[in-house]
Image (tube, rainbow, N blue to C red):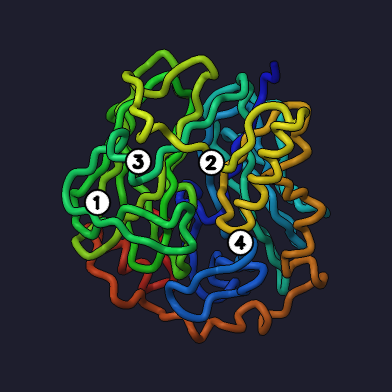
Amino acid sequence: MATSWNITLNDTSPVFTYDPCYDGFGLGNGWQVWYSETGYNTAPANTGNGISAHITSLAGANVTLSFYGSGIELHGTANCTFDVTLDGTFSSALNSTSNVLYSNQTLSEGIHLLTLTAQPTSGQQLALENAVIYIGQAIPQIESFSNTNTTFLNYAGNWTVGTDVHVPGGDFHSTETMGSSVSTSFGGSSAVVIQGIVNWGNWQYTVSLNGTQYVLNASSFWFIPDTTLFYEGGLDPGQTYVLNITDSSEDGNKLSINSVTLYQLQSTTSIGSTLPSSSKPSKTGEIAGSVAGAAVLLAFVVGFLFWRRSRRPKTVISAPDLDVLENENIPEARATYFPALSAAHISSTTAIEHAGDFPLVPISRKTSTDDSLHRRESEIGCIVDRW
């Protein structure tokens, strides 16, 4: 039995902390979200097509990720140097000629903190596509519960069911009422993932796992129909967990949930009682276990086709196949997508081609529970990741 697996977190996930901001205008001012087919944004709430990346030309712009695992790879590209701080150990003036910006596969199993800081000079840039987290445990069974599964998920407050062709499964639960929440309890799992929407008009939300709270931000200039709103690994399969997601913004700011996924021990059940057949969790397009064998090959193909439509950000693969990452999206095949590789230097004119189309201050957004967050957005003209 394989004893290692991984999970991929897309750059659009709020679990990343971007500084000075999550999304804005002008690469020289911070981070800007870019899509391989759409390019840069021209108006709030546009839908991006293709592979996304966070790109910056600002020296000192950084991204931080806290994760549980035994290894990590950061995928992207850069024609500049960058620094990495991992668990307090600082490595300076790093560079990469491939689409693997940074890799460390020798960490002790546990919680780690990584910060990557871009150090571009004139015309240079760095693009981050995703992070692959490696976990040194037996490959889990993946159980995904749709937002419409009210046997598993308990909604409180004012929620509505919305539909959108870009959302996997087509349906999502959404609220604009501060204090509205959705909760569940589960056991037998080593990790949990919440999928949802990041969009213009979405705002802060609070995730509580057995009383530990995390405040995150689901706001972006883009409409991102499915990304990881929350991920927590290193759970004790023998323990029961209570998970709660709450809209912690002023009324009028949205929180949208697509699904909750549990990474379970192969021989355990995710909740205390057996679900009726109509409420059993649905399988997602991720791949678990060894890629050897016809059954897994079929699942691999189905997963890839599903990703092409929805770009699900989670993948589980076995230790012998760690070179194959995120639904057959092999690094060498991705590298040419990034504009940083199209030339040795990117001119400032190209980098901020659509800058004038971005509002300096977010429009049609209610006042946040933290007014200083909006003041900071006004000052720097971009969406602050979290406060």
Q: Marks 4/2: CA distance?
A: 21 Å
Q: Marks 1/2: CA distance?
A: 29 Å
Q: Marks 3/2: CA distance?
A: 25 Å
Q: Marks 1/3: CA distance?
A: 11 Å
Residue 52 numbered tag: 4
First in sequence, mark 1 or 2: give its number: 1
The answer to whether residue 228 is left or right of residue 218 is right
| Nearer to us: label 1 or label 4 | 4
Q: Where's residue 161, x and y in %? A: 29, 56
From the image, tell me which residue sits under label 2.
284
| Nearer to us: label 3 or label 2 | 2
The kind of residue tagged 3 is Tyr
Asked whether the beta carbons under mark 1 and mark 3 sit within 8 Å of each other, the answer is no
Q: Where's residue 203, x and y in %? A: 32, 59
Q: Residues within 10 Å of mark 4 (few under 14, many from 20)?
A: many
The quarter of the image holding the N terminus is top right
Under circle 2, the secondary element is loop
Q: Residues within 10 Å of mark 1 (few under 14, many from 20)?
A: many
From the image, tell me which residue sits under label 1.
248
From the image, tell me which residue sits under label 3.
214
